[in-house]
Structures are given as C-alpha cells and as structure tokens.
Image (tube, grey):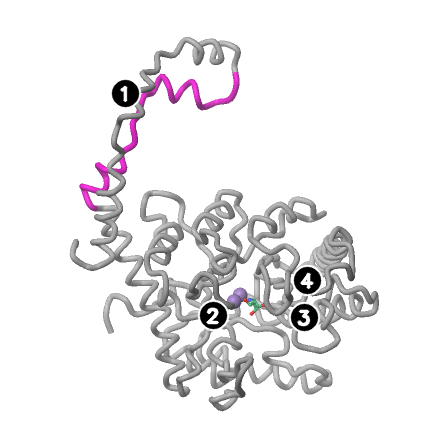
C-alpha cells in the first residue's frame, strides 16, 4: 500500500465490459475466458475500485425471460452488497444486436426505432434498480456509410425525439437519473452523427428537458478527432454539463484503442487530471472517474487486473504531480497574469457607452506589448520537469 493506491473517495469505476473484455478484436477471437459478472465485481473490489458500470446485456443476456432477468439481477445485487461496490452509471447496448445494423434511434425503419426505445426503457429500469444515477447514451451505430441513405437533419430529429421521449419517461417514473451523451467521430460506422463533445453540447440545448442532459466525453474519441480532450472537457465543465467521463489512453490518428489511462499521451493526461482536480484553484469535477478501457490482448486475467490497478494508480500519481506543480512558487510566479484593475473593470460587467468611449481613449503601446516575452517556455519546461519527477 502507498499514497497512490485507490480509495473510495477517488470514485474510480470500470464497466463490466472493460475488465471483462476477453481480448477479441477484428482480427482474432477471444484470448481470455469470459468472466462471470459477479467475479468481475469481486475482482474490482480487490483492486480498490469504487463502482462498476454496465450495459443491459453485460449482465442480462439479450432475450432473457423476466424470471431469468430477476434471478441474474438478484445475484448481482447480493455481490454488490457483499463487496460494497456501487453502480454509478448504466447504459444500453444499442450497437451489438444485428437489428441495430442501421442505427437504433436514427434507423430508417420505425420498428427499429420503436424497439430501441423499448429496450432503452427496460435498461433504464434495470440501471435504476441497481442504483445508477447517471445514464449514458453512446450512439455506436448512429451514423452512415452510404450517406444518401437518410437526410442527416432527419437523423438529428429522430435522435432528439428519442431523447425527449426517454427524458419524459424518466420524469414520469420519478427516477433520480440524469443522461450523459457520449460522442465519437467514427467506428463502427464510417461517420457517426454528433461526432464530438462540442456537437453534443449544442444538441443538448435543443432538447425539451435539456437540464437533465449532459455529456460523457471520452479521451480516445476526442483524440481520434484530433482535438484537445482537455479543452472539450473544460467547455463541458464551464457549461455545467460534465455529468460523467470516460478515461483511457489513445494515440492520435488511430482506431479507438481504449488503452490503459495515461499509457500514451502522459502530458495531456496530466493536464486533464489537473483540470478535473482543480489543482490550479478552479472548481473540481465531483463525478465518477470511469475507465472505459481494456487490457492488451497479450494479457491473461491477472494481466487484466494489472491494467485496472495501473489506470487508478496513474490517475492518483498525476493528481499528486499536479498538486506539486501548482504549489511550486516558480509556477505561481510564472502563471501570475498581468493585472490592471482599471482595464479589468472595462472588460468585465458587459457593455456600456462610457466603456466604449474609454476603450477608444485607451493608451496602448502596441510595439512594447508585442515585444514582451511571456515565459511560456520556462512554464512548460517546469511542468515537464514535475512530470518527469525531477521537481518536488
Ligand atoms: C464506448 O466508448 C462506449 C460504450 O462502451 C458505452 O456505451 C459507453 C459508456 O462508457 N462508452
Ligand atoms: Mn472508446
Ligand atoms: Mn466510452
């Protein structure tokens, strides 16, 4: 045990499908045995995880009878009680069953869309029964190859209809549940609708019950799109819409790798943890830290638990590094911006005719300002030295 071991207050969670991933990929079958859901929960508890998430079918096989469903759920709940793990988030598998090959909520066939709604209502009931307070929607099949197959405007209308209906269902049932929309630019579809967190943030504002809908950004998905994940998360936080987050590792320009957290772009992982933990004095994110990732195909089951422990330890090490960085006197000095209260007063608090006049009268030595060095090289070097462990 050391300072970086996971504790319940870290709120680390994993999906059943992550540590339960048998190592299948598009070019090869499973390399690990399929683990029973209750065994996965016990393994997560041994690792120090706080929560376990699931798609409906991760626990209850597609097409199970009501009696079978209740037996499976009852056994799972006993294991949760035995281990103390909770279910912070649930979601629906609207991407594996062949019926969803043309999408679920955006499919051209209205019967497919109707079936997707029914499956999601059942999955929401299951998630709430297990104690979930967050419900994720990842539109894995909501997209196209042959783009002429439907008007993308119509696709958005269908997606909105489905979410408005399901928000109303949650309200009608009196559930204490919020929705979190997860974006991805492509894979498995050639192009997916609502491909980034930014697209989702706008789309949420067009929904009937927008206040109960936020986002679930994933590191790999924004990185696949070539974007700064930290900036997307910052926009979601600033909008009060970061309801959940999927943490993993990813190299830019590759398929969705879902690697161990921090195992690829360590600098960006550091900047993300610094933002989430608010070590620079900003408000911290208070939700679950969910690792939507899986172990290398090279690993056996023991290697999967190495992967899980690695995700959590890396997060805690980076949080300690970020605290040291933001407490470093040289960093405080380098980050202290120029403060001119009378200018600040002009810029803040909105427009005024007198402010416009004052701005026009403002003395600005444009050349002197332009010539000023900002010492970002030193700031970034100090950050890298904290990351590399040569500054305490
Ligand atoms: C993939 O990134 C998606 C699905 O695994 C799931 O629907 C969602 C929940 O984290 N992430
Ligand atoms: Mn992913
Ligand atoms: Mn995800």
Looking at the rendered structure, the secondary structure element under dot 4 is strand
Say which of 120 and 173 sits in front.
Answer: 120
The CB of the residue at mark 2 lies under 8 Å from ligand 2: yes
In magenta stretch: residue 329: yes
Q: Nearer the viewer, mark 4 or mark 1?
A: 1
Residue at the disc numbered 3: 94
Q: Nearer the viewer, mark 3 or mark 4?
A: 4
Q: How far apart are the two marked residues, 2 and 3, measured between alpha carbons? A: 20 Å
**Counting other residues with Cα less than 10 Å from the Cα at mark 2, is it few (<14), some (14-19), or many (20 or more)?**
some
| Mark 2 vs 4, N-terminal side | 4
**Figure quadrant of the C terminus:** bottom left
The CB of the residue at mark 4 lies under 8 Å from ligand 1: no
Residue at the disc numbered 2: 257
In magenta stretch: residue 386: no
- Residue 315 x, y percent position in the rendering: 34, 63
Residue at the disc numbered 1: 368
* CB-based contact (under 8 Å), mark 4 and mark 1: no
């Amino acid at each position: 045990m050391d300072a970086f071991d996971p504790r319940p207050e870290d709120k680390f969670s994993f999906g059943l499908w992550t540590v339960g991933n048998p190592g299948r990929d598009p070019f090869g079958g499973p390399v690990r045995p399929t683990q029973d859901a209750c065994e996965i929960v016990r393994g997560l508890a041994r690792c120090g995880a706080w929560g376990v998430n699931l798609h409906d079918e991760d626990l209850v096989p597609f097409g199970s009878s009501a009696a079978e469903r209740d037996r499976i759920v009852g056994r799972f709940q006993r294991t949760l009680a035995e281990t103390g793990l909770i279910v912070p988030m649930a979601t629906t598998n609207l991407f594996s069953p062949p019926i969803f090959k043309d999408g679920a909520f955006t499919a051209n066939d209205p019967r497919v869309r109707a079936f997707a709604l029914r499956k999601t209502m059942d999955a929401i009931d299951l998630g709430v029964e297990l104690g979930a307070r967050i419900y994720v929607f990842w539109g894995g099949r909501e997209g196209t190859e042959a783009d002429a197959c439907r008007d993308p405007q119509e696709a958005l209308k269908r997606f909105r209809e489905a979410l408005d209906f399901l928000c109303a269902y949650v309200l009608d049932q009196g559930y204490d549940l919020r929705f979190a929309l997860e974006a991805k630019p492509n894979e498995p579809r050639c192009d997916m609708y609502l491909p980034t967190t930014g697209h989702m943030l706008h789309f949420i504002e067009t929904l009937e019950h927008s206040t109960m809908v936020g986002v679930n950004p994933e590191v790999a998905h924004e990185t696949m799109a070539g974007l700064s994940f930290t900036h997307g998360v910052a926009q979601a936080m600033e909008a009060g819409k970061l309801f959940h987050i999927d943490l993993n590792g990813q190299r830019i320009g590759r398929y969705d790798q879902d690697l161990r957290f921090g195992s690829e772009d360590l600098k960006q992982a550091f900047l993300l943890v610094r933002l989430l933990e608010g070590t620079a004095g900003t408000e911290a994110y208070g939700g679950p830290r969910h690792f939507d990732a899986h172990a290398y195909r090279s690993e056996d089951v023991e290697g999967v638990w190495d992967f899980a422990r690695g995700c959590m330890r890396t997060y805690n090490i980076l949080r300690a590094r970020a605290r040291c960085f933001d407490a470093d006197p040289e960093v405080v000095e380098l980050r202290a911006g120029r403060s001119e209260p009378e200018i600040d007063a002009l810029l803040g608090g909105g427009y005024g005719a007198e402010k416009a006049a004052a701005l026009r009268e403002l003395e600005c030595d444009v050349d002197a300002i332009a010539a000023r060095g900002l010492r970002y090289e030193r700031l970034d070097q100090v950050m890298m030295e904290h990351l590399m462990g040569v500054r305490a």
